[in-house]
Amino acid sequence: MKKLSKLIQSIRHLFTILCGAILFFIRPRLMLNHQKKWAPFVQWDYAHRGLHDNLWGVPENSLPAFQAAVDKGYGIELDVHLTADNELVVHHDDTLYRMCHVERDIKDMTLKEIRQYTLLGTEEKIPTLQEVLELVGGRVPLLIELKTESHTCDRLCRILSKTMRSYSGNYILESFNPLALRWFRKNEPQILRGQLSCNFFKEKPHCDLVLFMITVLGSNFLSRPDFISYKYTDYKNPSVRINCRLFQARLALWTINTIDAYDAVRNSADLIIFEGIEP
């Protein structure tokens, strides 16, 4: 009986250590003045890549799409890449193929080269982040996604940080790359930042360790994000629930593309990122 009792006690001890380790890895930032910091952002729905319609001449991540979102009173979600000559441009994909029908990578092109091409046969070109900031002018909040690889991460973050210092509007940051969020944790801790994620086991059958850690929010120990930005079809997993319920992290859900889906999740999320509908 004594041996059994010791065994049970050891198992309990190991279980406690395991639970503590899991909570350490997935924990977000624990923040004071939580409500005050989030007040400018939580009353908005965010138009994914602007209020666009790729089939009807308003391309995603274009100035007309952002103007339409401002006119309708929506927040804006947008994507930022770094060019070969260290300019920040607003575009989702790593390449120009889908939107400009050119098989070239943004990271290998200068801004001048990128400006040679237009979006989906329109007259619109890929805008710089500075052009978007001037257009929006603080009228609606921005949710900026950092598109970065590990070797360009610090450079993009430094340039973005410098660019945003002259912007007086409200904005928050998000990224799939926890190293980008870690940079802002260390250098600009006052900026709210979010860990983007989804169930990568669905997206990529051969999910590697890095994607596994991002799926279960195990990379939070690097970035200590203020919010979780999760794919809305996947958000009911234990790691997301622990972050939101136990640690009171805010939750953004993406990308809601039907009114039924919007109605189903709007009371579960602090921020909703939508596309193809107008809530």
Image (spheres, helix red, strand yellow):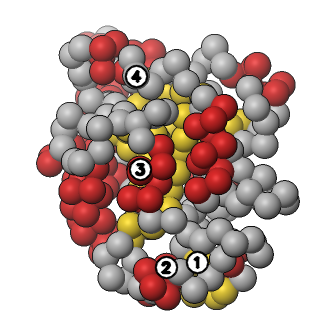
**Residue type highlighted by circle 3:** Leu
Residue 149 in the figure: left or right of residue 154: right
Q: Do the residues labelled 2 and 1 touch (CB within 8 Å)?
A: yes
Name the residue carrying label 2: 106
**Looking at this view, is 182 or 74 the one in front?**
74
Q: Which of marks 2 and 4 is nearer the N terminus?
A: 4
Mark-to-mark CA distance, 2 and 4: 32 Å
Name the residue: 54% across, 34% down: 75
Is residue 226 depicted above or below 231 in this figure? Answer: above
Name the residue: 58% across, 37% down: 70
Residue 145 in the figure: left or right of residue 185: right
Residue 193: where, in percent of width, then height?
Answer: 34, 39
Q: Are marks 1 and 3 in contact (CB under 8 Å)?
A: no
Category of crowding for the residue at label 3, using alpha-carbon neighbours closer than 10 angstroms: few (below 14), some (14–19), many (at least 20): some
Mark-to-mark CA distance, 2 and 3: 20 Å
Name the residue carrying label 4: 40
Q: The N terminus appears in which quarter of the rendering?
A: top left
Secondary structure under the numbered disc 4 in the rendered image: loop
**Looking at this view, is 203 or 87 the one in front?**
87
Which dot marks residue 133? 3
Q: Nearer the viewer, mark 2 or mark 3?
A: 3
Mark-to-mark CA distance, 1 and 3: 23 Å
Secondary structure under the numbered disc 3 in the rendered image: helix
**Residue type highlighted by circle 1:** Thr
Q: Which of marks 2 and 3 is nearer the N terminus?
A: 2
Residue 170 visible in image: yes
Which dot marks residue 53? none
Category of crowding for the residue at label 4, using alpha-carbon neighbours closer than 10 angstroms: few (below 14), some (14–19), many (at least 20): some
Secondary structure under the numbered disc 2 in the rendered image: helix
Name the residue: 68% across, 37% down: 274
Q: The C terminus appears in which quarter of the rendering?
A: top right
